[in-house]
Amino acid sequence: MTKKILKPARLDYHDHSFRQQLEHLLTWENVSDDKVHSTVKDIITTVRKRGDGALLDYSRRFDRVSASSMKELTVSQQQLQDALDAIPDEQRKALEIAAARIRSYHKRQVLESWTCKERSGTKLGQKVQPMDRVGLYVPGGQATYPSSVLMNAIPAHVAGVEEIIMMVPTPDGVINDMVLAAAALAGVHKVFTVGGAQAIAALAYGTETVPRVDKIVGPGNIYVATAKREVFGQVGIDMIAGPSEILVVCDGLTDPDWIAMDLFSQAEHDEDAQAILVSDDLEFLHEVDDCMNHLVHELERREIIKASINKRGALIHVPNMKAACDVVNHIAPEHLELSVANPEALLPDIRHAGAIFMGRHTAEALGDYCAGPNHVLPTSGTARFSSPLGVYDFQKRSSLIHFSDKGASEMGKVASVLARGESLTAHARSAEFRIKK
Amino acid sequence: MTKKILKPARLDYHDHSFRQQLEHLLTWENVSDDKVHSTVKDIITTVRKRGDGALLDYSRRFDRVSASSMKELTVSQQQLQDALDAIPDEQRKALEIAAARIRSYHKRQVLESWTCKERSGTKLGQKVQPMDRVGLYVPGGQATYPSSVLMNAIPAHVAGVEEIIMMVPTPDGVINDMVLAAAALAGVHKVFTVGGAQAIAALAYGTETVPRVDKIVGPGNIYVATAKREVFGQVGIDMIAGPSEILVVCDGLTDPDWIAMDLFSQAEHDEDAQAILVSDDLEFLHEVDDCMNHLVHELERREIIKASINKRGALIHVPNMKAACDVVNHIAPEHLELSVANPEALLPDIRHAGAIFMGRHTAEALGDYCAGPNHVLPTSGTARFSSPLGVYDFQKRSSLIHFSDKGASEMGKVASVLARGESLTAHARSAEFRIKK
């Protein structure tokens, strides 16, 4: 028998300290480091002051890339197309299918403008427009994910953003063809091979070469995340993501090997990732435990999986599916798998989850690549109040108010009373000017 | 002749340094104070540790309110109703009309869930749900605005939020009946008379009495704003607002007194507020300048208006309406008035504005109270990437993915290729398990 190296926590819903144990399991605080913070502030100030020159310096220092002008740090549309032509046929086809499905799903999210007319002739409405220009950060080196380029750029492209600018560092000058190919398919307009906090600063404030954007999205290391937080307000940003999580709810009738591998597909992301299985079948929890301990040895990323499962993994026994949904709503997981016979029946009780994978065949990994919905999802319980990345994140609204003479006269009286109640008499008089005598 | 006390800046679009002058005019940085920051962090830690006890202590210290239990800091539904009955009839009617119009407009913003089915039997969709619980901060003392209660609470109520909790400080025990009346009309569920950073901490983390919420909205002083920024991530927050702004575009044919008063209706908010007039009629700019200098003397808040106009106000001459729209899009104003004969004709060229007030009769002040659209709008140029507060800010989405056996088998192959391309083999194997042999 193989050695049992995985020891996920075991929790029981009926245990009197269950809530406490669960809280302890979920605890994860993003420790902000003063040193990182001051380095990032410094980089932002320098980029604002010195522009392109600062970007060239930082690329030399951090990525060991010696360029004498920004032209050398710019990837042309031709190079993107060349990368698409250079990758193996099988990968190109897979990328194309994924891109098409993501595009088709996201098209359904487009928000439309509307207006309505009142009897007085007054018109009200909301005008929805895409942002002008958006920045997409893509990490370089090991963790360069073409799927992430598709997931971040396609919604912006579907929204109608005129200019999508990608920043991707090339440590030691190495660039990933799959990433450039994905950029070509996703409709990225410009690519600069600049990374780190300096890339974020350039996008937020602009340089001689890099145009200032309205919003910055995409994952990154702690320097990138800190820089995004710092420039928030100057530009829009997406959510700062925590470690990836999966919560699987199973009735005990799915192949335990499948469930074990589904848990691993999150655990392999990084040591802080969290994989939790909830079931009303205690015997099944034991089986999955065994399968995990058996399967882990075959996997390339077993050391990461081991760290993740032993630190943050858990098998939770619940008395019934109602209790399972209660656990789900308490955790508000990024990924939720409902690996049960009739997932539709549970849906009304699910209040919080980033994405819901329904039925035994819907592996979470399908959602990471090619199901269609976005894989950028709210982590760390933020599904209580936030949503998957979508087209709506690249659109913005303006209220429209067009009063007729008659409408302005009627409503001027109301506004006048309320403004005077708040002692704002210039407000009141501005409204009163439009009251018909 | 009355003394000329207002001296708004004069800018000309054709001036070679126009862009620089405009940038200078718009500059406004929210200076974050280390002392405020450490005070706020301290308050949050104390509330997390000591709960209700800390709230009672801080209320004693900051608001000079001595309560021995949270019950004394709780306003009952009956008290809200009593306040509604106590206010003068005219004010009650005005509040009711405003609330009804705001509700009716916001109902059009409700997002709906959707699903679609593919030929393989695979179902995709997005489930939209309201947040469970939302906190609304309302400033106390001088700047207590009932209109702000309506604008923040009604969208949450329309979204279907189960519990809307209002926090309003009562310095020296004074409470504003109009604010409580507005809470009754807006559908607020619970009110605690607690303010400052301690109110935000209580909403974000919960105490014995105050339930933890999912999102916090509403204006506040620098302590409240800093606390909101600090708890962001633990809960959702709305935008941190900068000073209020209005940009009026006029063809020179609106009564200059009206335009002067419209500019004042923003300027009277505070000394940092910004009021700008853009016109292609130079003579009209002079006229409005005269009217402002004439009218200002009649106004209660003239000292604030004087500070605001002389520090940040401007009259901008442009050659034509195309140039006016260019200025608008550069500024991305919170409030935009198109005081022209045919505002519809300009609309396609307006890219960025929080709310657009169209035609000579649509005073911006109407939008502050009773037009229907929200008065919580993106400030300081953030209309480039953000939207008015709306029902959508209190709803969140979950992706729905339900693969058929056949769909999972087909897409499993695609996911496998892409996952292996990213060296994530547990992802690949999880998908491969579902491929039919």
Image (tube, coloured by chain):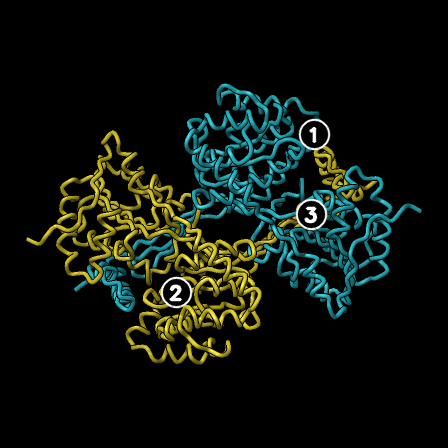
Chain colours: A yellow, B cyan
Q: Earlier in the sequence, mark 3 or mark 1?
A: 1
Instruction: Give percent across and percent down for residue A152.
Output: 42, 62
Please tell me whether mark 3 sits on a helix, a strand or a loop.
loop
Do the numbered discs 1 and 2 sit on residues whose CB atoms are within 8 Å?
no
User: Is A255 situated above or below A349?
Assistant: below
Give the residue at x 51% y 47%: B392
Chain ID for label 1? B
Place residue B167 in its image quadrant.
top right
**Where in the figure is residue A434, as x and y percent of width and height?**
79, 44
Question: Label 3 is found on which chain of the structure?
Answer: B
Three-letter residue code for mark 2 = Pro
The three-letter code of the residue at mark 3 reads: Asp
Residue A86 lies, in percent from the top left, at 34, 80
Dot 3 and dot 1 within a common chain = yes
The residue that disc 1 covers is B91
Distance between mark 3 and mark 1 Cα atoms = 30 Å
From the viewer's perspective, is A341 left or right of A215?
left
Q: In this image, B187 relative to A363: left or right?
A: right
Tag on residue A139? 2
Residue situated furthest left in the rendering: A1
**Mark 1 secondary-structure assignment:** helix
Specify the subunit that label 2 lies on.
Answer: A
As measured in the structure, the alpha-carbon distance from the residue carrying label 1 to the one carrying label 2 is 57 Å
Is residue B115 visible to the viewer in this orientation of the structure? no
Return the residue found at the far top. Answer: B68
* Residue bearing mark 3: B272
* Relative image position of residue A156 (x, y in whole percent): 48, 63
How much space separates mark 2 and mark 3, taking CA atoms? 40 Å
Mark 1: few/some/many CA within 10 Å (<14, 14-19, 20+): some
Q: Is residue B223 visible?
A: yes
Residue drawn 52% across the image and 54% down it: A232
